[in-house]
Amino acid sequence: MARNAEKAMTALARFRQAQLEEGKVKERRPFLASECSELPKAEKWRRQIISEISKKVAQIQNAGLGEFKIRDLNDEINKLLREKGHWEVRIKELGGPDYARVGPRMLDHEGKAVPGNRGYKYFGAARDLPGVRELFEKEPAPAMRKSRAELMKEVDAEYYGYRDEDDGVLLPLEAQYEKQAVQEAVQKWRKEKESRLSGDKQPEEEEEESIYNAHKEEPEEEESQEEMEGEEGGVTFMAHVPVPSQKEVEEALVRRKKMELLQRYASETLQAQSQTARTLLGV
């Protein structure tokens, strides 16, 4: 049995169609949507464009059409989509519904728009064409850096090392190394003790004594040391800082007493003048 498409192409069917259309002028869709001034006709042309888009979207699903045919079909679909948008704007101007807001957008969602390519969409087999597949490959998202607050959430007692002994590994190791360190310290102490008993340390002690003797040989005017004998055992102490004499101490006490009396009985002006005079004299 012949299919419907083959029946429609027979000579009898074409003759019958010509008879039905005899005397009728087939109306063509205006090239510009602004040329239409009737709302029903604008709705008619919009529906016609949607029908053409549906047919071409069904055709472009066939990957065996070839690269050039698929590219041509994809260009035609995008062109019809732009034309449909123009008619929707014209319908809104004529007082019709706003299809851009309330109308179905299934036809637009069938294609994928490439970002930054002015809304050009690829349908069906056009998505797998050479050079197009790479456009839809998403780059891996960069690793998100943690904020300071998120990092502080991970800081606990374990971060500061308070739980290092909980694993049962650190304490035995510390005990082992501590025992080894104690043995080494004991052996070192025994060697030093034996060397002191055998007289190995005498030269060093003599050198230390000679250092103090060198200080005693310096002139009395340049040295700043004072020997003091203790009450018990006659231990000798040496001062390595300048020690004032009795006369210098008395002069310092007199100056301090004068300053106290001046601050108590003299006025601020007199104090300032006195301070200026001492500064000029270098006192």
Image (cartoon, helix red, strand yellow):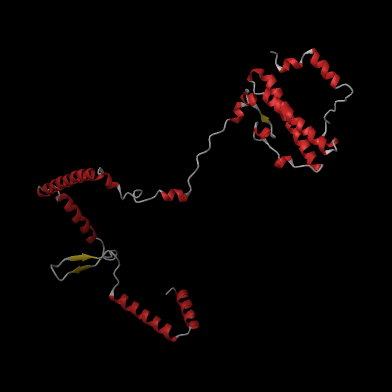
Q: Is residue 122 left or right of residue 208?
A: right
Q: Residue furthest front?
A: 1
Q: Position of residue 194 (x, y in %)?
A: 11, 47
- Where 90 sits versus 79, above or below? below
- Where 210 sits versus 77, above or below? below
Q: Residue furthest left?
A: 198
Q: Residue 113, can we see it?
A: no
Q: Position of residue 99 (x, y in %)?
A: 73, 40
Residue at position x 20%, y 43% in the image: 176
- Where 259 sits versus 232, above or below? below
Q: Is residue 82 left or right of residue 30?
A: left
Residue 10, picture quadrant: top right
Q: 154 or 58, which is in the foreground?
A: 58
Tally of numbered discs: 0
Q: Position of residue 209 (x, y in %)?
A: 18, 56
- Where 23 sits versus 99, above or below? above
Q: 245 or 39, which is in the foreground?
A: 39
